Image (cartoon, grey):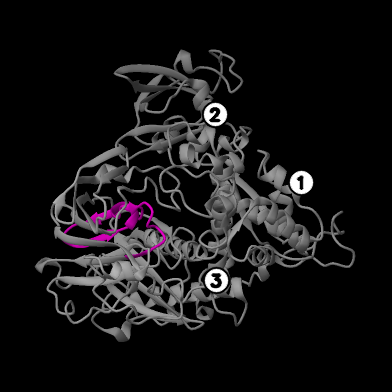
């Protein structure tokens, strides 16, 4: 449709010039100069009802104009049915009501007369999902992904989309954060009361990929390679050390840009926005091309020392900040920041070919999530190590945690990474009591495949996984890719085919050869007794009694007949039914280890362990479906398959990081490379 025909219509025009305020060289988010398309007016007036009021203006609609709301949001692979929260949809065309017909769960059709100029849709969206995937609105804060609010106008997806935000007296001091390009209001709109601003997207895809954060925000900025980065935080309590978070986030960004572009090249975006919501409980993030939405526990934010807020001179300098540990919440937060920022290259630009264009109406399956989520999970903590934010001991603890997570899950033996990726929609995101037995995390095991490939490449002395990902990005020009592209780049960089490794590690279910590979880098693979839950084959909750959440396949708990949902109430020891040896043989009356029968109330596994001390078997007393059951349970021994957990460490006097002799595939004259140039554990005074 031409510009001239639009100019003659009575369609509303964006209340601003075509040049965005504060425009950057980032053409991906610059305000478009093409004829404007759909215009969304979003009003925040019913805060306590958690309702957004929306008016959608569609210029020159089709005779049978269809609109639909996405059923999922890219980056979170589950059909979430956002339309369930849309209410009161009605339509008028050029001032007259027109009929609406619902075609399916998320699509509607409006019948418009010939020559119609303006179709207007009005509706409300309920917003009370605190996650990063949907929408939220209350008296303190607003947040939404346009996939939850903004109907897609069929046939006009490629036109520019305009967004207006309007508040009320209750939101007059609210700020707005989004990666969308702002547009400067013209004189008629500059002083409009309760206006929160105007933004424009090049098309619907860009609008859908641009979440909006609203409220009273802590905000700060920094620049890396000439690229403006902004960090906004909502929900932070008193004593929040924003300067430390800003400094550490900048350090992560510098490390990521250096990873992808070396010492001088600029990243492929002109600005970037971090939106962090701090809550009492919660954790997660969702990646976007120019921003990320994050959630963390309020307790995980860095805090000023007592008195620091009142006496800034008491705030610690970077050199005084204590070293982070693997269990620190702030370590997890920094890893999350690194993970989502890494995605700006690795899934938002370089991405599976299946996501060349998004289909917002149905699942889009790919077998490559192990590459994009798993490899990102490998490098997120590794970037913290490279940036000096954690030391090697902390990194090895984080790595061991991932190893144990994978090795203690029976599902790894029956579900390949390729299958796990493809079935994310129905398995990974739909967790049930049998999930540990039926599937494997493409995040966790995918990160271990990345580790194994990196170690193998370095042991053979030709390159690292860093070089492979950079070459893959260049080969695919930061766009869609197939698994064949990865195989080609691995062969190009590594000097041989890695198809056997990919077939075994990604499309097969065998365990990875990580103990030997880690030893090539001087890292010892040690084992120690596993927690009691793992030795029994249980995952439990102890918040309100001892509740069984999962029973692992082939475990002692499964053999005893314990089931998910059972409440473990008590323990019998020394009774006839529990009087058997670890081999299952009945104990004799003369057995010196026999005890007087007794029964005990238990509420934690620690209590179970205390009362079962010295026993070969016990009787678990459980409640199930209103019944009390007595279940004989063999007590675990050190010989049980899951009796141990992995711990990694570098010896105080490490052996040579190279194998004694070249591996069969190692090039003649090539020398193994130390894993990522790991630094020695740095003291806090050496930290940036």
Q: Where residue 481 sits in the image (x, y, percent)?
A: 62, 56
Residue wearing tag 3: 256
Q: Where residue 688 sits in the image (x, y, percent)?
A: 50, 80
The 10 Å Cα crowd at callout 1, few under 14, some 14 to 19, many 20 or more, is few
Disc number lying in front (1 or 2) = 1
Mark 1 in CB contact with mark 2 (< 8 angstroms): no
Q: Which residue occupies 43% across, 19% down?
A: 596
Q: Is residue 624 visible?
A: yes
Q: In this rendering, is residue 349 above or below 444?
A: below
Q: In this rendering, is residue 552 above or below 513?
A: above
Residue wearing tag 1: 500
The 10 Å Cα crowd at callout 3, few under 14, some 14 to 19, many 20 or more, is many
Q: Secondary structure at mark 2?
A: loop
Q: Is residue 397 visible?
A: no
Residue wearing tag 2: 553
Q: CA distance from mark 2 to mark 3?
A: 40 Å
Foreground residue among 665 and 162: 162
N-terminal of the pair, mark 2 or mark 3, is 3
Q: Which residue occupies 50% across, 42% down?
A: 424
The residue range painted magenta reads 132-161
């Amino acid at each position: 449709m031409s510009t001239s025909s639009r100019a003659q219509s009575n369609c509303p025009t964006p209340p601003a010039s075509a040049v965005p305020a504060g425009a950057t060289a980032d053409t991906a988010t610059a305000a478009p100069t093409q004829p404007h398309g759909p215009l969304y007016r979003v009003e925040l007036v019913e805060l306590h009802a958690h309702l957004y009021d929306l008016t959608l203006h569609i210029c020159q609609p089709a005779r049978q104009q269809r609109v639909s709301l996405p059923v999922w949001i890219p980056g979170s692979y589950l059909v979430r049915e956002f339309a369930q929260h849309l209410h009161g949809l009605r339509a008028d065309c050029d001032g007259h009501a027109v009929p609406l017909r619902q075609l399916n769960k998320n699509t509607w059709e409006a019948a418009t007369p010939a020559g119609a100029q303006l179709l207007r849709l009005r509706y409300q969206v309920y917003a009370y999902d605190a996650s990063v995937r949907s929408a939220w609105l209350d008296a303190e804060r607003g947040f939404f992904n346009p996939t939850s609010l903004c109907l897609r106008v069929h046939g006009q997806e490629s036109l520019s989309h305009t967004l207006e935000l309007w508040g009320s007296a209750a939101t007059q001091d609210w700020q707005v954060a989004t990666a969308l390009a702002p547009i400067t209001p013209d004189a008629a709109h500059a002083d409009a009361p309760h206006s929160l601003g105007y933004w424009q997207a090049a098309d619907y895809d860009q609008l859908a990929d641009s979440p909006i954060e609203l409220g009273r925000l802590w905000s700060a900025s920094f620049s890396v390679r000439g690229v403006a980065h902004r960090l906004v935080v909502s929900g932070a309590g008193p004593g929040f050390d924003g300067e430390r978070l800003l400094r550490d986030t900048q350090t992560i960004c510098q490390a990521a840009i250096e990873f992808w572009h070396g010492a001088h090249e600029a990243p492929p975006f002109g600005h970037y926005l971090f939106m962090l919501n701090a809550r009492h409980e919660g954790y997660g993030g969702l990646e976007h091309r120019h921003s990320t939405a994050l959630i963390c526990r309020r307790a995980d934010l860095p805090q000023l020392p007592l008195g620091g807020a009142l006496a800034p001179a008491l705030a610690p300098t970077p050199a005084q900040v204590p070293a982070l540990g693997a269990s620190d919440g702030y370590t997890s937060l920094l890893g999350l920041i690194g993970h989502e920022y890494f995605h700006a290259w690795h899934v938002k630009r370089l991405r599976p070919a299946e996501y060349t264009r998004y289909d917002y109406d149905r699942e889009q399956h790919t077998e490559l999530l192990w590459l994009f989520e798993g490899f990102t999970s490998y490098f997120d903590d590794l970037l913290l190590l490279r940036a000096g934010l954690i030391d090697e001991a902390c990194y090895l603890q984080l790595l061991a945690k991932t190893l144990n997570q994978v090795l203690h899950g029976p599902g790894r033996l029956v579900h390949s990474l390729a299958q796990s990726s493809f079935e994310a929609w129905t398995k990974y995101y739909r967790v049930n009591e049998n999930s540990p037995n039926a599937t494997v995390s493409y995040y966790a095991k995918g990160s271990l495949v990345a580790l194994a490939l990196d170690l193998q490449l370095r042991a053979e002395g030709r390159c690292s996984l860093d070089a492979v990902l950079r070459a893959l990005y260049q080969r695919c020009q930061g766009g869609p890719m197939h698994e064949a592209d990865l195989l080609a780049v691995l062969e190009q960089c590594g000097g041989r085919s890695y198809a056997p490794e990919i077939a075994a590690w990604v499309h097969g279910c065998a365990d990875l050869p990580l103990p030997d590979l880690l030893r090539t880098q001087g890292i010892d693979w040690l084992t120690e007794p596993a927690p009691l839950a793992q030795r029994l084959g249980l995952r439990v909750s102890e918040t309100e009694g001892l509740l069984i959440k999962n029973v692992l396949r082939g475990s002692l708990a499964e053999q005893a007949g314990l089931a998910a949902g059972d409440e473990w109430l008590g323990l019998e020891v020394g009774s006839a039914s529990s009087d058997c040896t670890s081999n299952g043989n009945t104990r004799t009356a003369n057995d010196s280890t026999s005890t007087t029968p007794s029964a005990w109330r238990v509420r934690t596994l620690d209590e179970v362990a205390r009362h079962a001390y010295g026993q070969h078997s016990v009787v678990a007393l459980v409640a199930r479906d209103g019944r009390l059951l007595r279940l004989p349970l063999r007590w675990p021994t050190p010989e049980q398959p899951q009796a141990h957990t992995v711990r990694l460490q570098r010896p105080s006097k490490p052996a040579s990081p190279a194998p004694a002799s070249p591996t069969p595939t190692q090039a003649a004259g090539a020398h193994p490379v130390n894993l990522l140039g790991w630094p020695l554990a740095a003291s806090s005074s050496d930290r940036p």
